[in-house]
Each structure stands twice: as structure tokens, then as C-alpha cells.
Image (cartoon, rainbow, N blue to C red):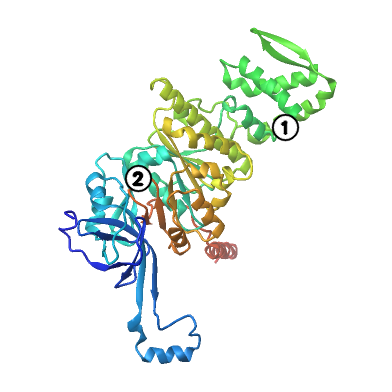
Amino acid sequence: MDYVGNYDLRLLGRVIGETSHTVVLFTANRPPRVGEYVLIEYDGEDFALGIVEMSRIGNPLLTNRMLRPEVISRAESFGVEKHEYMIGQARLLSWLNTLIRERKVEAPRYPPKPMARVFEASGKILRKIFSLNNDGAWIRLGVLANHPDVPFYVNINTIISRHLAILAITGAGKSNTVAVLTRRMVDELGGTVLIIDMHSEYEGVADNVNIVKPKINPSKLSLYEYYRLLNLEPKASKQRLYFRRAYTFARYVTLKRPEEFFDVLISELEFYVNKGKYREVRNGNIVSIEFSSRDRSPVIDLLNKLYDLRDRYWGTILTPTAPMELTSVIKPGYANVVQLGSFDEEVADVITSHYLRRVLDERKRFRISGGSEGYPVALLTVIEEAHILVPKDRSTLTKEVASRIAREGRKFGVGLCLVSQRPKNVDDNALSQTNNKIILRLVEPSDQRYVQAASETLSDELLGLLPSLNVGEAVVLGLMTPLPAVVKIDRAKGKIEGGDVKALEEWRRWRSRSDRDLYDDLGI
């Protein structure tokens, strides 16, 4: 009790009913606030810290059977409000002394006694629990929603090693949350973040920001990324076969001049069509092999698809002069924002998977080479609209790479952050491996259940809190925080275009412009 003896504790109530080592009921002298912290006394020797999960007010004289308004009015004149009772339910989280002295969670293994006193957790005590550690790996996310004088921090090392999901309905504050985390990682800690920006809304996310206009050297695209761009489905087996042959051949002959890769790829398929042969490299020698005339038609179709791809994306996505070194594209120490607002989902999938694949491969090279090769710093990869790029019910290239990062990324310093307003449509395997969660307002019951199934510490009571959260409030769970918390997230600095379009403003602006044009025409 030495840590609380120096503080004036305010009695909130007493434990009632049958207790357990995980949950207690208590009467209260005021309505307990869901998400606030309380101290439960144990035999006058120690305290357990708990979080309020449920709050109720009742009156035994006003039952559910009293349906007539005139009866309620008469009861009011008799002073029945004196019989009101207030009850809270708290989940026991840890011994208080262990939290403060050793900065670790140790859950009680036996219950408190009925009639044990329940106190409000003061701001001073909570600041000791949630205070910054000395290792420098903590950044501020916001304040405790029920204790606005207590700042709340999260651990960056744990976010990158154990991954993160930011989930909420549209307009609840997802983009703001991403912006707060990114700015403080990058501008305060010198960290590196890669944001897959599906709606081009993060241009002002940090002072050190690098806007990435997707330009990929064609020689760096993988075989399956070309399949996706060319819309070569698995059933197009002939076209996949001949493209693989041309791709492999072009890789070999342009090994020292990668800027020629795409031209060689096209010329090789033209050779197939004109000669009825394909070429391979065997034992260092180029050999020509005839193929069936029946295959000429699908090869012609394949060549036309490649022409179309060149016409659509040459000089934009496909750029032979694009930097080969990953550090020239994704700059260490910056918020690197890949703007995908002008691309459809298929192209966005290819671009996203391409950068994620290269990041993971380069970080592996860095570790294996002892730091002499590869990408030199750990980073967090943020995937906006994860329900589109990492969907539950279909295959995408991004989903495959994101799953690899979820499994392997922690060993190589690649963190994954999934952001979505449709959690139930996000791949459950990837979502369940995000051990940290920032869950803002969620209304849809199926979304809530899906998130709970992917979370180890989201109780039914905290789940029930999600629909009533205000904009910018979140339930924060996982190893990145000392304890589960209801947090009011800070407002991000800079310009983040995450809100809805204001139609009336645009109409008025256009009308004003039209009126000015009319006046100019009239010489007024």
C-alpha cells in the first residue's frame, strides 16, 4: 500500500456479491464511467487495478412493470429517487505495486473479499502507470478519455514487432490516428513509415514527408505482378506459359542493361508470333523451339495485352529510368506516402504488393548480410483500405505479401498496420496477427464480433462500448500499451484530407465563380 498511502484516495464504493479473481461487482456513490480505472482493496495490504466495463443505475421501486405515466408521476412525489442504486463491474488487470515498481502486468490469482473498498484511481497514480519509460521508444497517442489529465503513450518497438490494426466506421478518426502515429514516429523519433494512400489524403502527414508517385522499373516487377497487370487469370494457362518463357528470357539477356527489359519482352513475343518459335537459354546457349500452330492465337492475344499495357502506363507506372535502389524511392527517416488515388484497385494491388515485397526482401538482405546490403532501417508499413487490398474472400497480391509480413516481419524489422472501416471483410489470418489494436467507433455487430474474434483481450463489455465512442475516442489493446485503455486521440497537425466532401461549399464556390464570369462578360 506504500504507493497509494501518499495520495488522498476517494472512495467510490464497495465490492458486493460473489467475487472472482478476474471480475468484481461493486456498489457506487456515483455512476461509474465505463473505461475509468479503479483500485480494489485486498485485505488492507495491496490494491488491484481494475477497469470499469459496465455501469448501471436502478431503483427497486421502479420496475419494468410500471408502464403507466401517471403511476411514475405519483411515485416521483413520494421521493423514490432516494432508493436509487448504482452498480459497476470492473475487470481486474494487475497488482498496483507490480505495475508501478516493475512496470509489468501481474494479474491477481485470488479474488477480493465482499465489502472490500473500491477507490477511484487518481490522476497521480495513473500518471505513474502510464508515464514514459526511459528507453525512448514511446510516443504520445492521446489522453485517457476518463482522465484527460493523464497522457497516453504507445511503444513503437512493439508496434513494429507485433503489428497493429486501426479499425472504425467512416468518419470516426482512422486517418487522424494514422497521422498522429506517423508524425510522432517520423518527426520526433526519426522513424520510417510507408503509407499506402488509397485516396491521396496524407500529403501533409509529417514535416519530413516524401510523396511517392508510383514509378516502377519494368525489370523490377515480378512475374505475378505482370500477370495481374495483364489480367492473366490462372485459367489462361497458355498465355501464362508463354509469358513466363518470354519473361525468363528477357531477364537473362538484359541482366546488365535492365532499362531494356520491357523492349526485349515485347520483341521476344513478336518473335514468337512471326517465327512460330520460342527461345530458351540452355547451358549458356540460346536455343529456338517450335511450338504448335494452335498456340499462335493466344500468343497474339498476349502480345496485344502487352501493347495495351505499354500504351496505358508507359512513362507513368512503367518507367525504365525509375530508381533501382529502394532507398531512392522509400527514403529512410521519412513518411513515404504512395499516392494511389488515381488508380483502380487492380493497379493499386500491383503497386502495393511491389513495394511491400521489395521492402521485406531488402530487409531480409540487410539482416543476412550483417548490414552491408539491403534496406538499412526498420519501418512501419500502413495499408489503408485493407478490406480492398487484403480481403477475406478473394486472392490479391497484396494479401499474400501482407500475410508474409505478418508472419515474418518482426524478425526483420518490418511492421504491418492494417486500416479499415470494414473489419469483417479483412483477411482474418492477417488481422489476427496484428497483436495491437486501436478500435474507434464500430456500430455494425458483425464487424464487432469479427474484431473480437481476432483480439485476445477485447471483452464483451468493452465490445459493447464501441458503438457509443465519440469521434476520436478508441479502445486501445495489445502489448504496445501497459493496459487496455479508452483513449481520446490527439488531433493531428498538418493537412489530412480524411473527411467527407462538403457538397454545399463546393456548390456555393462554383456559383460564386459563375456569377463572377457573368459579371466579367457584362463588363460590370
- The residue to which callout 1 is attached is 305
Work out whether mark 2 precedes mark 1 in sequence or the reverse, and give the earlier one. 2
Numbered disc 2: secondary structure: helix
Pick the residue in front: 419 or 445.
445
Q: In this view, does 308 lie to the left or right of 523?
A: right
The kind of residue tagged 1 is Lys
Q: Where is residue 384 in the image (x, y as percent from the top left)?
A: 51, 46
Q: Which of marks 2 and 1 is in front?
A: 2
Q: Which residue occupies the foreground of this view, 238 or 262?
A: 238
Provide the secondary structure element on which disc 1 rests: helix
Give the left or right position of residue 99, taking residue 515 as reference.
left
Work out which quarter of the rendered image holds the C terminus and state it. bottom right
Q: Hey, which quadrant is residue 112 in on the image?
A: bottom left
- Residue 317 relative to residue 66: left or right: right
Measured as percent of width and height from the top left, residue 70 is found at: 47, 92
Asked if 196 appears above or below 169 in the picture, the reply is: above
**Which is nearer the eye, 115 or 439?**
115
Q: Which residue is drawn at 72% across and 32% down?
A: 305
Q: Where is residue 52 in the image (x, y as percent from the top left)?
A: 36, 62
Identity, as a three-letter code, of the amino acid under mark 2 = Arg
Q: Quadrant of the N terminus?
A: bottom left
Could one spot residue 195 in this view of the protein? yes
| Corner quadrant of residue 232 | top right
Q: Please identify the residue farthest to the right as the structure is shown.
A: 293
Query: What residue is at 36 percent from the left and 37 percent from the top?
Result: 191
Which of the pair 41/128 is nearer the observer? 41
In the rendered view, would you say 157 is above or below 79?
Answer: above
- Residue 383: in sight, yes or no? no
Image position, residue 33 (x, y; %): 35, 66
Q: Residues within 10 Å of mark 2 (few under 14, many from 20)?
A: some
Q: Give residue 184's mark.
A: 2
For the residues bearing labels 2 and 1, Cβ distance under 8 angstroms: no
